Image (tube, grey):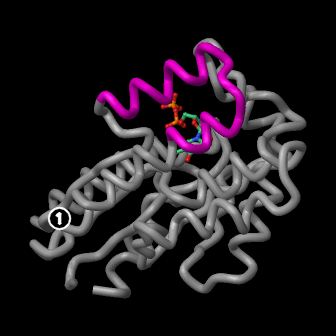
Amino acid sequence: MTGQFITFEGIDGSGKTTISQEVYIRLQKKNRDIILTREPTDTWRGSMIAKAIEENCNPLTIALTFMADRSEHVIQIRKWLEKKSVVLCDRYMDSTFAYQTAQLSPYMKNPLEWLQTIHHLFYLEPDITFLFIIEPQKALQRIKRKRSTFEKKDFLERVQKNYVALAKNDKRFIILDASLSIEELTKKCIDKISHIQ
Ligand code: TYD
């Protein structure tokens, strides 16, 4: 596999969607064969996740829907990478590890281990994961639209802690201060991506 797989992670309101879109536009201008994708995906599986959250399904159901979506998405991502594309993905498996660990901890002993074991069946590791770190209170202030069930300060604090713990053990993570300007953050991402080309 010779493409590059780059993921953007962080709590809601951290700005990862804006930066991934900016990076996409800049790399397109450099004539790179580039794909911008996201999770939950824009498919019936993504709609199923939205429905599960809207209907307040239990965290186990929600975790399984996110993973069902990903196991199909990975098949598509592998095809893009085989064509040597640079694939940018706005949220990926670390979202599940950070958010669902926070949600599932009252239900089981070691949710991260359980989630990671399931991922062995469709595991595809990113080359780089940009992790946008921000004060949860500030992140919530940035969210203008109606907030989802995940968008509460205490919950996002736990999610961010989980993200930081994941990043500590893994060199693919690049931690970014999400309070920097869009221009600065975009430049940092482009520099890192160019570095591994
Ligand atoms: P997001 O793409 O951030 O939605 P929006 O475009 O509305 O900002 O994802 C929706 C929510 O789903 C977000 O709160 C994070 C959560 N999420 C998980 O809990 N687990 C996952 O595996 C993924 C991909 C997202």
Tell me the quadrant of the picture where the N terminus can be found.
bottom left
Instruction: Tell me which amino acid carries mark 1.
Output: Trp
Counting from the top left corner in percent of width and height, residue 164 is at 76, 66
Q: Residue at x 43, y 46 (%)?
A: 68
Q: Residue at x 70, y 54 (%)?
A: 98
Quadrant housing residue 29: bottom left
Rendered view: 162 above or below 155: below
Highlighted range, magenta: 44-65
Counting from the top left corner in percent of width and height, residue 168 is at 75, 79
For label 1, count other residues whose C-alpha is less than 10 Å away and answer few (under 14), some (14-19) or many (20+): many
Asked whether residue 89 is drawn in magenta, I would say: no
Q: 90 or 137: nearer the eye?
A: 90
Asked whether residue 64 is drawn in magenta, I would say: yes
Q: Give the total of numbered labels.
A: 1
**Majority secondary structure of the magenta segment?**
helix
Q: Is residue 174 left or right of residue 32?
A: right
Counting from the top left corner in percent of width and height, residue 143 is at 64, 25
Rendered view: 71 above or below 128: above
The residue pinned by badge 1 equals 80
Counting from the top left corner in percent of width and height, residue 39 is at 43, 44
Q: Residue at x 40, y 32 (%)?
A: 46
